[in-house]
Amino acid sequence: MPTDLPKRILIGRALRSDKLGETLLPKRIALPVFASDALSSVAYAPEEILLTLSLAGASAIHFSWQIGVVVAIVMLAVVASYRQNVHAYPSGGGDYEVATVNHGPNSGLVVASALMVDYILTVAVSTTSGVANVVSAVPALRGHELTLSVVVVILLMGMNLRGVRESGSAFAVPTYAFMVGVVGMVVYGVFRHFGLGQEMPAESAGFHLQATAGNESLAGFAMVFLLLKAFSSGCAALTGVEAISNGVPAFRKPKSKNAATTLLMMASVAVVMFMGIIWLARLTGVQMAEEPAHQLVGVPGDYHQKTALAQISEAVFSNFTPGFYFVAAVTGLILVLAANTAFNGFPVLGSILAQDRYLPRQLHTRGDRLAFSNGIILLALAAILFIVAFDADPTRLIQLYIVGVFVSFNMSQSGMIRHWTRNLRTETDPAKRRHMQRSRAINTFGLVMTMAVLIVVLATKISHAWIAIAAMVVLFVMMKAIRRHYDRVSAELVAAEEPDDVVLPTRVHAIVLVSKLHKPALRALAYARLARAHTLEAVTVNVDPVDTAALRAEWDERGIEVPLKVLDSPFREITGPVLDYVKNLRRSSPRDVVSVYIPEYVVGHWYEHLLHNQSALRLKGRLLFKPGVMVTSVPWQLESSERRKPQKAWSAPGAVRRGEPRAPKAVKSEVSAKPAGSADSSKKDSSQ
């Protein structure tokens, strides 16, 4: 195929199915593959807290560290809960499997739709946030955020089409570099502050932050509502935690143990980085505002607000510029590569759903590199759609982000509680019972935390979150419809016991469609003769009387004994008269099968398809819906379809290839011999 070489260059050589074990991941590679989303969230989650608190002015900013502590507690609770999940359900279904087994199929579909939306938004948020950080460091790129984001998604898709192990190895270095950069920045900031006693003011530290209009004197319930909204924004740091439970099959053995260890490593590093950034934000005096031009007093007219992490790293490394550029570079990279978590989670989930007949079966098929290629491509297209719709604005996209993930958190934790409760009813070993009770307590605490967050998110972000909720509802309804379709098809295809379903047709009436008496038509007639139908006739449609008369004359001149039936078409249509004729044949003899042979050209270039076979395609598409009608395409390969000039076609009169039996001698042409059954009976049938 002409596309094979570019395909091999882009995604590599195809892998055998028995090489799947070689793609399994050790913990050092699994951490960047599955945890890059959760780790990268610390780059923008603190900023979302500051932006929300800025609505009430400078007086509310000091609540940032308390909110950060609560977010960290929730993260640890969720991670502890998911450590129970990976041991109890190591098959890779994750939250979907937990909800389906313990709450039923509908609950599983709710979780699946929530996770799919979450994965799509993970790609959209990660790429746009990464591009925003790069633009903060390289202002020359400003105004090209949308294009850059789309290009990044396409590049990520290409990397993941090469396989999980290859993409993980490529993304490992940037992920570890990000951890080193942020932790190093925190350590260096602590050293400068406590060891050297130096001040590290951010570029926005000298500005005065004032509240937005209407929020100048927030107090009581209004202030509590604002704090809850800031907390829900900060909970974006928890996104991606569930990816490891969905990717357990990709780990090396012992799979559950390695997955649980990776979860603990991820949580430890993420909490340190998250709290370190919040502490440095207060230390450097970073001022973030939803509307910088109106809320920040003292800013110049051309001021462009950088991201919080960019301002912090610029302040901490004010005496070491390479440190700032290193943090900016690895932050942009990790935010972009965080989408890789979704590229590993979404295709696996899609494969499981396809296996359960809730999504098209194509999503269950592995590609050349043993990755679920169709799922990867589908995820990329959906993410690009969101990026374009929201103009690559990460702040607007984040507002939709955490609804889906916390829906799945809640369903998963409640499912695990039912799981442990069910097992405790039958378990008698005291040690195992204590372990189950401890695990149930952990999942109960996780459920309380995640339910509180979900309630807060829905209460504070419903004006934005409805889009994500609507997308979940659409996916849920679509998956139910797909399952009904597959169930209906399966029921129809099951071998029935009724004798009518296995009775052979009494007769086969063959029809060869001809427009001119050329080589493709002669081949179709010869092939139809070999099938030995009970009756055989050629059919043409009288679109142009002159052409039809010429065809009749040539037909008689050649002495072809297959009868030629001419169908009138006063409106010069081809498809309608043929369909009516076939319908009449079926109506007159319902037990007969009508076999329609259609000559077709095979061309070698895409643009040639526009010039040939359009009528044949339309006719085949209509005939396929007619019961009792069999459609056979008889191809004629044009020279453009062959790399070298083809040998003389087998259908040419008298032509025989070496080793092939010679066809019966024709009277005047290859189709002039009588068809199976008497010629008289064929003529009689065609005249009725």
Image (tube, rainbow, N blue to C red):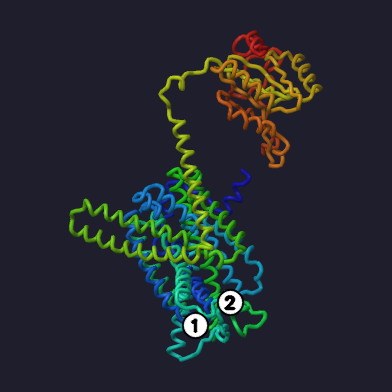
The amino acid type found where label 2 is placed reads Ala
- Toward the viewer: 295 or 561? 295
Task: Identify the image quadrant of residue 299.
Answer: bottom right
Above or below residue 192? Residue 684 is above
Above or below residue 65? Residue 545 is above
Residue 428: image x %, image y %? 18, 54
Q: Do the CB atoms of the residues marked 1 and 2 lie less than 8 Å apart?
A: no
Residue 301: image x %, image y %? 67, 81
Q: Is residue 422 left or right of residue 603?
A: left
Q: Is residue 62 left or right of residue 306?
A: left
Q: What is the residue that sits farthest to the right in this orientation?
A: 546
Residue in the picture at 57% in, 83% down: 203
- Toward the viewer: 341 or 557? 341
Above or below residue 83? Residue 610 is above
Q: Is residue 383 visible?
A: yes
Locate the C terminus and report the quarter of the image it occupies: top right
- Pair 1/2: label in front: 2
Of the numbered discs 1 and 2, the one sitting upstream in the chain is 1
The amino acid type found where label 1 is placed reads Ser
Residue in the picture at 37% in, 52% down: 99
Which residue carries the number 2 mark?
213
Q: Is residue 177 visible?
A: no
Residue 420: image x %, image y %? 28, 56
Dot 2 crowding, Cα within 10 Å, few <14, some 14–19, many 20+: few
Residue in the picture at 57% in, 74% down: 290
Q: Secondary structure at mark 2?
A: loop
Q: Secondary structure at mark 1?
A: helix
Residue 97: image x %, image y %? 38, 51
Mark 1 and mark 2: span between their CA atoms? 15 Å
Which residue carries the number 1 mark?
59
Dot 1 crowding, Cα within 10 Å, few <14, some 14–19, many 20+: some
